[in-house]
Amino acid sequence: MEQFFTQAQKHLKRTAIISKGNSYTYSDLISQSGAVAQHLLQGRVDLNGARIAFLAPPSFEYTVLMWGIWRAGGIAVPLCEKHPLPSMQYVIDDTQAEALVYTQEFNEKLTPLSHKVKNFLAYEDIPSYPATFHLEIEKERSALILYTSGTTGNPKGVVTTHQNIEAQITSLTTSWEWSKEDHILNILPMHHVHGIINVLSCALWSGACCEFLPKFDSEKVFDSFNQGAINVFMAVPTIYYKLIAYWNELPDTKKDQISNSLNKFRLMVSGSAALPVSVLEAWKKISGHTLLERYGMTEMGMAISNSYNGKRIPGHIGLPLEGVTVRLVDEKNEIVTQGTQGEIQVKGPNIFKEYWNKPQATKDAFTEEGWFKTGDIAIFENHCYRILGRNSVDIIKSGGYKISALEIEEALRKHPAIKECGVVGVANEEWGELICASLIITENEIDFDAISDWLKESLPSYKIPRKYKILDDLPRNVMGKVTKNELKKLF
Ligand code: MCA
Ligand code: AMP
């Protein structure tokens, strides 16, 4: 946080954020986040790592809350507006959050959780304070908890320190040549690394401008591009797919206008999931840009990236970023020979500190020599890395979100009409993978829409199966374990 703050002081009069049609300077960001910090402290000197959950749309207010929590010595826990109440409650319970701060539009939604925290606070009720607030925060202290799905049922809280965040930001700002002249459009959800670190924090670190569009919408994205100020864009492959589909339906004059705007961009990045070469090529025809594909994970920020200035090889993720060390190992944890596939393992100052309150899971995530085990399988070829898949079929990537098949199965099994189930991700060009569920039911028939609506009460919409199948039995191996690859074939 210290370094963030020092950087911001250099650009006080520059526009830091554009949101809801308003522009805010770095000076606004500093004074408002100081007010949040003072108010959260309630007379104390330091929050000393208290967890502060917050819910705000992607906006200036969101940014002010995150910075305010950091400046007061708290750990920021961003919630997701798309999550149903039980998902938010899980995060608040798991982190034992001291406070829940929200912008007014979420008051009604969050009121049932008000008794869970000591301080249930509307952003709009935070008074302004003199802009003198300063607390020194050591880099080793924890800063952020983001929830990620794993191969066990419930999501785990990934804790990163200020030092981790600084390492994640500086490797990107250097490699991708960020400058204060940059202006990025942020259309990503703000409870994940992609939107928080790669887009918002890299912009603010550089004295650049981050413009928020609270919800992804192809027409609005292209309208923003056509204004002519935005020169950097980052998104997941699904978003590029949707933009291409929208552009294809436009009249020629509109197409040309958009292509002319895109041609002037400095940088366009894709990540969070594999970028299909067909999408890369279609986007190149529209924009003139070969998308820069990079590879990362909540636990480590970005680790491997195509080069900014050099050649970008379609279907490949490039080379390790500065300060990051990567190796590929086999099942015996031995380094594979070049040209052989293996699990990506990573070391560096970017790697997270721990899973919140889960010492065993933290231990299991690393080798004895301290390498972080990503679970992603890659090969080194054509002088760079290419991702081949994951070592677990139970991790699904859909729309750029990482989703646990087991979490959905656990939720489905709670339905009285479902006896057993198996959830898989099936390859899909638009979504990366589509969530599909096979059900063994206790009744003669079942209404799939009703199942989806029922699931939405406990899971966010991006975790809801899009296809269902009724089976008499699930395919199993000799050990009795469901064979997910067989299940996939049924869809
Ligand atoms: C939504 N829909 C879906 C899915 N999600 N259908 C199939 N599969 C899905 N996964 C459907 C909805 O049911 C709805 O259909 C329609 O799409 C619109 O829903 P909505 O929620 O409004 O979707 P959207 O806003 O268009 O969302 C698409 C999206 C979103 C913008 C691509 O998924 C998104 O923001 N993804 C980014 C996730 C992200 O930031 N991941 C980074 C994780 P109907 O209208 O029929 O009801 S961080 C990370 O991975 C690491 C660190 C990294 O490397 O970056
Ligand atoms: P998350 O835990 O949500 O941060 O998702 C991280 C996972 O996204 C990684 O472990 C990869 O499986 C996947 N991922 C991220 N970037 C890429 C990429 N460029 N190509 C393929 N998979 C990716």
Image (cartoon, rainbow, N blue to C red):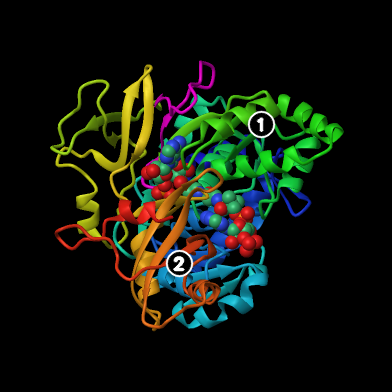
* Percent position of residue 325, x then y: 30, 29
Q: Nearer the viewer, residue 193 or 260?
A: 260
Which mark, by number, is residue 374? none
Task: Tell me where residue 64 sits by quadrant.
Answer: bottom right
Classify 286 as above or below 396.
above
- Residue indicated by mark 2: 44
Residue 121 horizontal side relative to residue 167, left or right = right
Instruction: Please identify the residue farthest to the right as the structure is shown.
Output: 253
- The residue positioned 69% from the left and 31% from the top of the image is 231
Q: Which of the image's four quarters has the C terminus?
A: bottom left
Q: Quadrant of ligand 1?
A: bottom right
Can residue 221 be seen by looking at this rendering? yes
* Percent position of residue 253, x then y: 86, 32
Query: What segment carries the magenta color?
Result: 297-319
Q: Nearer the viewer, residue 335 or 195?
A: 335
- The residue positioned 61% from the left and 44% from the top of the image is 239
Which secondary structure, mark 2? loop
- The residue positioned 72% from the left and 35% from the top of the image is 230
Q: Please name the amino acid that badge 1 sits on.
A: Asp
- Which secondary structure type mostly characterizes the magenta part of the structure? loop
Question: How many angstroms separate mark 1 from mark 2 (CA)?
Answer: 38 Å
Residue 351 horizontal side relative to residue 56, left or right = left
Can residue 166 be seen by looking at this rendering? no
- Residue indicated by mark 1: 182
* Percent position of residue 465, x then y: 48, 63
